[in-house]
Image (tube, rainbow, N blue to C red):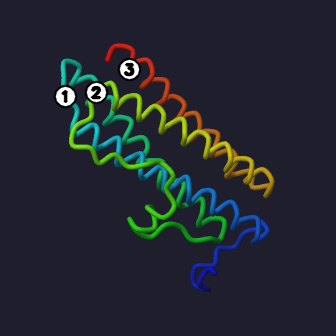
Amino acid sequence: MVAKALNTPTDLQSNATKTVAEALNGVLADSFALFFKTKNFHWHMSGPHFRDYHLLLDEQAAQIFAGTDDIAERVRKTGNTTLRSIGDIARHQTITDNDAEFVAPAAMLKELRDDNLKLVEALREAKDIADEAKDNATSAMIDNWTDDAERRAWFLFETGKTA
């Protein structure tokens, strides 16, 4: 239950917004997991394509991180609360961490591509939930986040051809 001080006025039905918020919090957790993995691979990139891959991953990480605020604020606009900690992220994420000491550049690109496509799947599910709740604003925002994730996956796929 949302604390009274955090109640945000909305014309959406509370049960529907709770479902949308749950889906968005999952997307948010996966976005943070993907952000950190992308930065991890950015920091640990090596090899002959270092500069290009290092810069690509930094650009992608920045885009992912920038989206997290929009996702969390959308949850709040629907009268709900969002993630509060690293532990909360861990409880909600479906994108797996990679704690390996060394990952080859080609494997990094493939893993990130697959993770971005997994995020696309979660976004499509969240869009269905938002549409069912008649939450047009969330639905429209999800379209942009989906396009961003698909573009990242595409760039990783094309870049991976040379890895």
Residue type at numbered disc 3:
Gly
For marks 2 and 3, give the CA distance.
Answer: 9 Å
Q: Which quadrant would the C terminus be assigned to in this image?
A: top left
The location of residue 26, given as percent across then percent down, is: 56, 57
Residue nearest the observer in this picture, 131 or 101: 101
Most extreme residue toward the left is 47
Residue nearest the observer in this picture, 101 or 10: 101
Q: Tell me what residue is drawn at x 41 percent, y 34 percent.
A: 111
Crowdedness near tag 3: few (<14), some (14–19) or many (≥20) residues, C-alpha within 10 Å: some
Q: Quadrant of residue 63?
A: top left
For marks 3 and 1, give the CA distance.
Answer: 14 Å
- Lower position in the chain sequence, tag 3 or tag 1: 1
Q: In the drawing, what numbered circle is on residue 105?
A: 2
Q: Are marks 2 and 1 in contact (CB under 8 Å)?
A: yes
Q: Tell me what residue is drawn at x 37 percent, y 41 percent.
A: 61
Residue type at numbered disc 1:
Ser
Q: Tell me what residue is drawn at x 63 percent, y 63 percent.
A: 22
Q: In the drawing, what numbered circle is on residue 46?
A: 1
Q: In the drawing, what numbered circle is on residue 160?
A: 3
SS state under label 2 = helix
Side of 7 relative to 129 (left or right): left
Side of 113 relative to 127 (left or right): left
